[in-house]
Image (spheres, grey):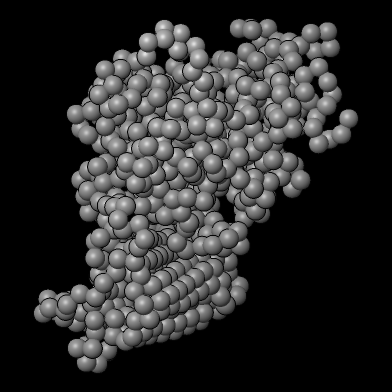
């Protein structure tokens, strides 16, 4: 190009930006949809679109570093003889051994235990390392039932019946053959090296009436000792939460579309489900309509990153939040220290999402022993604890600013919305107005 | 012999007793189950449990070591995820029978509904009668012996489980194919029938089915088969 000014005349198409062009050409080259990890990358209305109204003339704030702002949470007191007692309102979401290395799973358990909160198994069963290093462990009951056995079920502090997840509500999963080590294969009763499909629906129940009977069976097997959660991906959230409560859940987990996954089609991640922001509001409305708000606890996940997200979710009515992708990032995923290796994989720190292929330079989403050993579980545990501590302090800072002595005292009235979309989805008034779209003027 | 009359006693009391170490070696008799759900679930000791009548969902779910006999019919999910022991249904069993079960022996002397042995992971299942559609869907390992007929899509997307069918197969599911029966398979079939106490007559009529293993690793050229 001889014209030195040509760059100023280039105009990228809004319909066909560079990443869309690249994807069309990749699809034409490879003939298969893109499978990746991480969560939705598109911009959706989220907690950044809400702001807190700090105390001033009409509200009294609490003194930072002096006046107590409690963060404790009790989960599952509806039916369980041994409810879960958390010191902080932030838990670690379910991620499987298989998708993650054993070092990563151990790190999550260590960090959660330091902070007095829970971590969660995933598809593939419970490993001794994870159980041993997790003071409070939630055992996921998934459609595939890989590694599911009554002995581990009885070792769990709570059981989470997974109906769906935010990254792929209505979809199953696939652990690609390259991540199937001898140990993963043995735990899942499948040959090494083959793709392992995680089913999209449970094999022995369909619908909420069956789920009620299934929950009854799980309670009988565990002698009604531990809470039973039901996790749903955010779609028809009001109805799903209503049905989960009627089926007997002690705790409902709602995972918004920003929630992460180890391996799912990009088209699924980006185009199915609703954002976490409206999902929280819909879930709380369902609980209130049943007069079960605060009786059945609500855990919200999907794109939770910091104390501000946590505080806003709690203010909308959640009892706790759960983190997955953020926890992996805290462990070192997408860290610039691995930039040279990311470049070799054709990506860059901040963009790496090929969690499905087992080549993770940070040693987190891999079963390669050499890569996995890069992650020191003690250091990883410390990072998780530090990060959870920061999130908790941030949550308390915002709660104190609103004059709350417990983070659960935050309420919708403490917030305003920055955008019309967020105002409509969260049913929070647009800043500077009393207008909530859909509620009239 | 402890007897639990479920007309008077709650299922909770029964299951609690079965989870007590003192139940090891004992014989339990359960009367008037009247279609109740979760009867004898999570039994974990070598207990003999006889249920006189029909049961609802998930009877003998997650059974370990115990020997459970249902002298009647069983509802959905009978012996789901059992890991060891033996479960026998003298009548018929509804859908999802033996779902995801990891071990032990499950015998249904009558028929079962759809999805018998779905996602089975090592259990041996012997059905005296016929099974419904989509049986052995995604079956991973273990054996499914069907003395009667099999419904549509038998063994769809199955892995390493082995299926023997004495009657007609309505259709095979994706990646499920018929395989030759060799002498070792005949011996295996005889042993399974013997363990189950099922007299299937002349076993030369049985055919064997397993995975073609074409769908084990995703291949775009096979997309039309899913």
The residue lying at 53 percent from left, 47 percent from top is A169
Q: Quadrant of the N terminus of chain B?
A: bottom left
In the current view of this chain or complex, which residue is farthest to the left?
B183
The residue lying at 60 percent from left, 49 percent from top is A249
The residue lying at 36 percent from left, 20 percent from top is A349
**Location of residue B96 in the rendering, given as x and y in whole percent from the top left corner:** 44, 69
Say if B167 sits above or below A318 in the image: below
Say if B167 sits above or below A290 in the image: below
Q: Taking the image as drawn, is residue A372 in sight?
A: yes
In the current view of this chain or complex, which residue is farthest to the front?
A2
**Location of residue B148 in the rendering, given as x and y in whole percent from the top left corner:** 34, 86
- Is residue A41 toward the left or the right of residue A370 in the image? right
- Is residue A249 toward the left or the right of residue A329 in the image? right
**Location of residue A303 in the rendering, given as x and y in whole percent from the top left corner:** 53, 29
Would you identify the image quadrant in which residue B117 lies?
Answer: bottom left
Would you identify the image quadrant in which residue B174 lies?
Answer: bottom left
Task: Report the front residue among A33 and A333.
Answer: A33
Q: Taking the image as drawn, is residue A127 in sight?
A: no
Would you identify the image quadrant in which residue B214 lies?
Answer: bottom left
In the current view of this chain or complex, which residue is farthest to the right?
A441
């Amino acid at each position: 190009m001889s014209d030195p000014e040509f760059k100023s005349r280039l105009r990228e198409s809004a319909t066909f930006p560079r990443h869309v062009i690249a994807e069309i050409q990749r699809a034409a080259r490879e003939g298969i949809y893109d499978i990746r990890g991480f969560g939705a990358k598109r911009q959706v209305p989220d907690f950044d679109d809400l702001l807190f109204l700090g105390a001033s003339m009409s509200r009294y704030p609490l003194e930072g570093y002096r006046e107590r702002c409690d963060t404790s949470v009790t989960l599952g007191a509806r039916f369980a003889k041994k409810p879960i007692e958390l010191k902080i309102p932030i838990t670690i979401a379910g991620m499987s051994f298989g998708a993650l290395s054993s070092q990563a799973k151990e790190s999550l358990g260590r960090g959660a235990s330091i902070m007095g909160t829970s971590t969660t198994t995933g598809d593939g069963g419970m490993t001794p390392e994870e159980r041993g290093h997790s003071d409070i462990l939630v055992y996921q009951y998934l459609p595939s039932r890989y590694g599911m056995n009554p002995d581990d079920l009885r070792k769990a502090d709570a059981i989470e019946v997974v109906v769906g997840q935010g990254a792929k509500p209505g979809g199953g999963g696939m652990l690609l053959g390259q991540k199937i080590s001898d140990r993963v294969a043995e735990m899942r009763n499948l040959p090494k090296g083959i793709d392992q499909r995680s089913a999209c629906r449970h094999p022995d129940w369909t619908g909420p009436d069956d789920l009620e009977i299934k929950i009854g069976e799980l309670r009988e097997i565990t002698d009604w000792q531990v809470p039973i959660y039901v996790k749903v991906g955010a779609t028809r959230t009001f109805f799903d939460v209503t049905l989960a409560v009627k089926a007997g859940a002690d705790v409902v987990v709602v995972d918004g579309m920003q929630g992460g996954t180890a391996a799912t089609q990009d088209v699924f991640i980006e185009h199915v489900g609703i954002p976490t922001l409206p999902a929280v509001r819909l879930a709380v409305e369902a609980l209130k309509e049943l007069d079960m708000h605060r009786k059945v606890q609500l855990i919200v996940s999907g794109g939770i990153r910091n104390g501000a997200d946590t505080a806003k979710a709690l203010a909308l009515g959640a009892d706790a939040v759960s983190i997955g992708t953020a926890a992996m990032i805290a462990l070192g995923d997408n860290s610039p220290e691995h930039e040279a290796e990311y470049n070799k994989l054709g990506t860059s720190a901040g963009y790496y999402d090929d969690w499905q292929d087992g080549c993770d330079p940070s040693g987190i989403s891999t079963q390669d022993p050499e890569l996995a050993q890069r992650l020191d579980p003690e250091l990883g545990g410390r990072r998780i604890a530090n990060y959870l501590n920061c999130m908790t302090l941030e949550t308390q800072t915002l709660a104190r600013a609103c004059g709350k002595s417990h983070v659960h005292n935050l309420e919708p009235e403490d917030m305003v919305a920055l955008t019309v979309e967020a105002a409509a989805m969260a049913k929070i008034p647009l800043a500077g107005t009393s207008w909530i779209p859909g509620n009239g003027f | 012999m402890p007897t639990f009359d479920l007309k008077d006693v709650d299922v909770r009391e029964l299951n609690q007793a079965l989870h007590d170490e003192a139940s090891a070696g004992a014989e339990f008799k359960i009367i008037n189950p009247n279609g109740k759900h979760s009867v004898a679930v999570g039994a974990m000791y070598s207990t003999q449990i006889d249920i006189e009548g029909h049961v609802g969902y998930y009877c003998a779910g997650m059974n370990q070591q115990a020997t459970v006999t249902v002298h009647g019919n069983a509802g959905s999910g009978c012996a789901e995820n059992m890991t060891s022991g033996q479960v026998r249904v003298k009548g018929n069993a509804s859908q999802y029978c033996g779902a995801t079960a990891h071990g032990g022996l499950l015998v249904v002397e009558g028929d079962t509904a759809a999805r018998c042995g779905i996602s089975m992971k090592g259990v041996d299942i012997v059905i005296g009668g016929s099974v419904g559609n989509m049986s052995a869907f995604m079956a991973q390992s273990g054996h499914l012996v069907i003395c009667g007929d099999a419904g549509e899509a038998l063994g769809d997307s199955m892995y390493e489980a082995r299926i023997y069918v004495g009657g007609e197969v309505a259709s095979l599911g994706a990646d499920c194919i018929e395989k030759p029966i060799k002498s070792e398979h005949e011996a295996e079939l005889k042993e399974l029938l013997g363990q189950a106490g099922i007299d299937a007559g002349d076993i030369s009529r049985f055919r064997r089915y397993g995975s073609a293993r074409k769908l084990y690793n995703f291949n775009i050229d096979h997309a039309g088969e899913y």
